Image: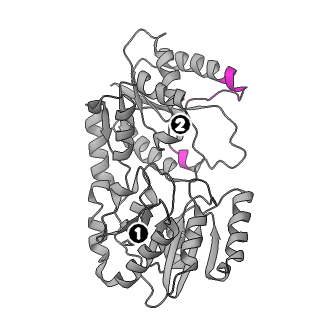
Amino acid sequence: MNQILITGDQPLGRGGMSTIIRTVSLHLKEKNALAGLFFDARSLDGIVDTTWLEDLPLFPTGDKTAKIIRKQAYIFRLIKLLKQNPDIRKIVCLTPNHCRLAYLATKFVSRKIEIISWIHFSVDTYKQREKRNLIRSCNYHLVISSGIREQLVELGAQAESCFVVYNSVSRKTETIERPKIEFSILYLGRIEFFRLKNLKELFSSVEGLSIPWHLHIVGSGSNEDLAQCRNYAQKIGIDGSITWHGWQSRPWDYIRDVIQKISCCVLSSKREGFAIVLTEAMSYGIPCVSSDCPTGPRDIIQNGVNGYLYQNTAHADENLRQALLKLYKSQAAFNPEKIKASITKFYSENYLARLDKILLS
């Protein structure tokens, strides 16, 4: 049977990207369509969590080397791997550069092998050379949001080669309840003060809330970002209304068992790929408020049904504040079961069915 190789930089194992790669890999393995995972050797700075790789077939990555030598070594190892595994007919690449390197490797193999991109970040985050690599190296693209599809088409990709698959989330039977009085706000994700996750905007918005609120932050970040966030929260006088829960290996179990009640989940990102945290929250019946960044959230949030989008342009902190107030005042209108139903197309069984039509046809 024709098989698929997944390749790219190894994810750190602490976010949604690792989760979705594992979900897809296990599904392909069950279908006997997964050759394995082949990650590029690189330094992971000692913070990698490899538990998500359990029960998945891995090809050796080789030794860490200088960047230029590493690219050459990666190509040589990939050529050898492809020659030793003649059933590999498709290579799914997680970065633009690996699309190019895989394309070059296939030129030394005497069979047709398709190159497929599966990037998990907005195209805007890549350099021009990397964008060119995406377009000129790939047969087609697995796209995790409609915004990324638009970006690829604008760069020159054929519209019919860009398949919007989104990301998946599992159905939940349980519902995380809301507190009756306090407005309990959840932020779950990487802690960044002013970079992509933009927690400064979230802190500035809740500062002016004229309602009883509390912010729960679940996640980790660099020491610099953590210090900036804590110092800023203290400076504007909201540190007493924030609980820092740190990184949790099973965050939603922790949220359900320890925090217990959540009014809404919030995302103040400048950029996202898909924003899987929103669908995860909605699968528990939690409404969400998110910035309308270029890609991701607008595919998920339906205003007034499962949350609100706010414009992250001028006066973004005030826009977020007003969205939070609007949700607070209309909480009763957000039915948890309707919120769960609003993300039906993202549930795993529907997601994997879409993927099968593309990858296994």
Colour scheme used in the picture?
Answer: one colour
Q: Chief secondary structure of the magenta span?
A: loop
Give residue 133's position: percent from left, percent from top.
48, 25
Near-viewer residue (254 or 328): 328
The answer to whether the residue labelled 1 contacts the one labelled 2, judged by CB atoms less than 8 Å apart, is no
Q: Residue at x 46, y 78 (%)?
A: 262
Q: Is residue 262 above or below residue 72?
A: below
Name the image quarter holding residue 215. Answer: bottom right
Q: Which mark is residue 126?
A: 2
Residue underneath mark 1: 288
Residue 183 pos. (x, y %): 48, 83
Badge 1 amino acid: Cys
Residue 62 in sight: yes
Q: Secondary structure at mark 2?
A: loop
Question: Residue 258: x, y in percent?
Answer: 55, 78
**Which picture quadrant has residue 38?**
top right
1 or 2: tag closer to the N-terminus: 2
State whether residue 336 is above or below residue 341.
below
Q: Magenta residues?
A: 52-70
Location of the N terminus (image quadrant): top left
Residue at position x 59%, y 58% from top? 190
The answer to whether 63 appears left or right of 348 in the picture is right
In 3D space, how far apart are the residues under numbered discs 1 and 2 (Cα atoms)? 28 Å
